[in-house]
Amino acid sequence: MTSRSEIAVRVLLFAGLAERAGVRERRLAELPAALTIDALLARLERDYPFLREVPFTVARNRALARRDEALEDGDEVALLPPVSGG
Amino acid sequence: MANEAAATPHLTRTRIDVDALVARVASVEAGALCTFLGTARRHSEGKEVNLLCYEAYPEMADAAIAAIVAEAQAQFAGARVAALHRLGDCPLGEASVAVVAAAPHRVEAFAACRYVIDAIKARAPIWKQEQFRDGTAWVGDPGSFRPREGG
């Protein structure tokens, strides 16, 4: 069980980001409560150094988010490359 | 995989049925009905494309298109709009996206249609992969080219 001082989040990757990472979804647990999106990205960069090189925006619970936002337990964080629909 | 989820009101994994889309907005109040289809093109920046493949963040893309349609209907007098984007493989010549706008007069129908397709392309979390003879690449993502395996 996750204690009150720790949170878990789901991270979704799309398109070229998923292809580079070789994974579309990661669950990260035992994170410090109120971890910011910036700090989460720093952790992800350890596993996926390419994240430093490629542009993307971040959505939190399906809405575009600022990187200084604090995460809550159960959040869904998506890394979105520049869109190219149509 | 997220992209194998069932179709939503604004996303489909099968060929777009334009007549069904027209039926969603047509009414005797409309004096104009403007249809836009984005279609899969063979050439991209000098390279020959064999197939396009679309991926989305389905829940967010569906909500984004719904919001864009609502904005257009609020902004253009009497407009009723339907929009559908295709996901997965889209063979050349087939529609990857369709927007249908009905309005009492053509000025609003054209404007609503234009607004919706431009906003979908700018805002909806949808990504286009081009498949070439020698590999694949994501549009707008330099460095994403991957050679075809065994090629």
Image (cartoon, helix red, strand yellow):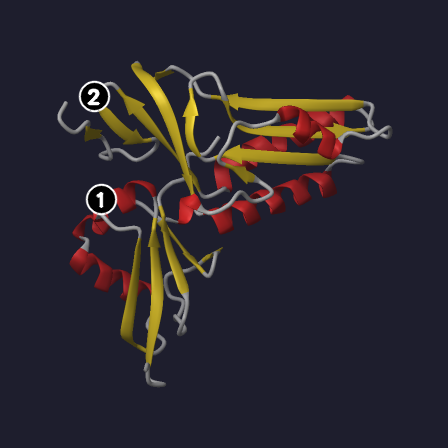
Identify which amino acid the numbered label 1 is placed on.
Answer: Arg
Q: Position of residue B145 (x, y in %)?
A: 23, 31
Q: Is residue B70 left or right of residue B43?
A: right
Chain letter of mark 2 equals B
Are the two marked residues, 1 and 2, in contact with CB atoms closer than 8 angstroms? no
Q: Quadrant of the C terminus of chain B?
A: top left
Q: Is residue A29 above or below residue B135?
A: below
Q: Determine crowd level at label 1: few under 14, some 14-19, many 20+ residues with C-alpha closer than 10 A.
A: some
Q: Is residue A4 left or right of residue B102?
A: left
Q: Is residue B20 left or right of residue A85?
A: right
Point 58% across, 40% down: residue: B10
Badge nearest the viewer, 1 or 2: 2
Numbered circle sitting on residue B134: 2
Chain letter of mark 1 equals A
Q: Is residue B45 visible?
A: no
Instruction: Report helix, strand or loop for mark 2.
Output: loop
Q: Is residue B62 above or below residue B132?
A: below
| Residue wearing tag 1 | A20
Of B149 and B97, which appears nearest the observer? B149
Q: Quadrant of residue B40?
A: top left
